[in-house]
Amino acid sequence: MCVSLAEGDLSWLRQQYHDFADEWRKPSEVTHLKVQRLLIGLELLLLDRLGFQPKLLSTGRDQQRVERVLYWYRQNLHLNPTVADIARVMGVSSVHLRRLFINVSNASPKNVLQDIRMRCIHDYLQNPESTVEGAAAEFGYADASSLTRAYRQCFGHSPRKQR
């Protein structure tokens, strides 16, 4: 795949390189979040240059931000990010992120993200070769029993009964 980049894109990439060089030499506890933010920027740049236009449920900047959060979250479920982690990656406070979600979806980010996570686990377990233990490891649960408790609370039955 080839993507044509404008001079402005190349300048942005150079600036990201220079901004990140010091962080790479002296990593801190938030380095992984900065890496994620950089990767999101690269993904968005490539998607834009490839002509990808996400379908938004409604117009408005808040809706676009929530859609970006949801996209990032789906791509990073395996990291088991908290709402605070997501807010940092997106460059907003946890309070602002909550306000965005309430305005757009009438639900807290924690509830929306938990719903997405449970739906992904449900889909994962549809594969006859998948296991509850595998799902727990894949989706960031400490063990199969903690996943089973969360699954039962969401769907009203254990994941084993689903299969």
Image (spheres, grey):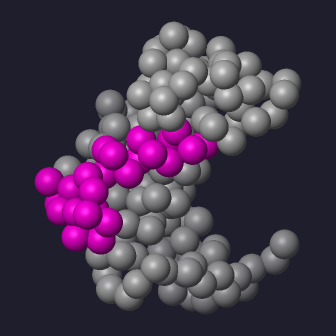
Which image quadrant: the N terminus? bottom right
Magenta-drawn stretch contains 50: no
- Please tell me whether residue 83 is drawn above or below residue 133 in the rendered image: below
Q: Residue at x 51, y 86 (%)?
A: 8
- Residue 94, x across and y down, in percent: 20, 50
Q: Residue at x 57, y 88 (%)?
A: 7
Which residue is nearer to you in this view: 144 or 159? Answer: 159
Q: Is residue 15 visible?
A: yes
The rendered magenta stretch, by its main secondary structure, is classed as: helix
Q: Residue at x 48, y 25 (%)?
A: 152
Q: Residue at x 14, y 54 (%)?
A: 95
The magenta segment: 95-120
Which image quarter: residue 93? bottom left
- Counting labels gives 0
Which image quadrant: the C terminus? top right
Magenta-drawn stretch contains 98: yes
Q: Is residue 137 left or right of residue 4?
A: left
- Please tell me whether residue 103 is drawn above or below residue 148 in the rendered image: below
Which residue is nearer to you in this view: 151 or 98? Answer: 151
Q: Is residue 73 left or right of residue 137?
A: left
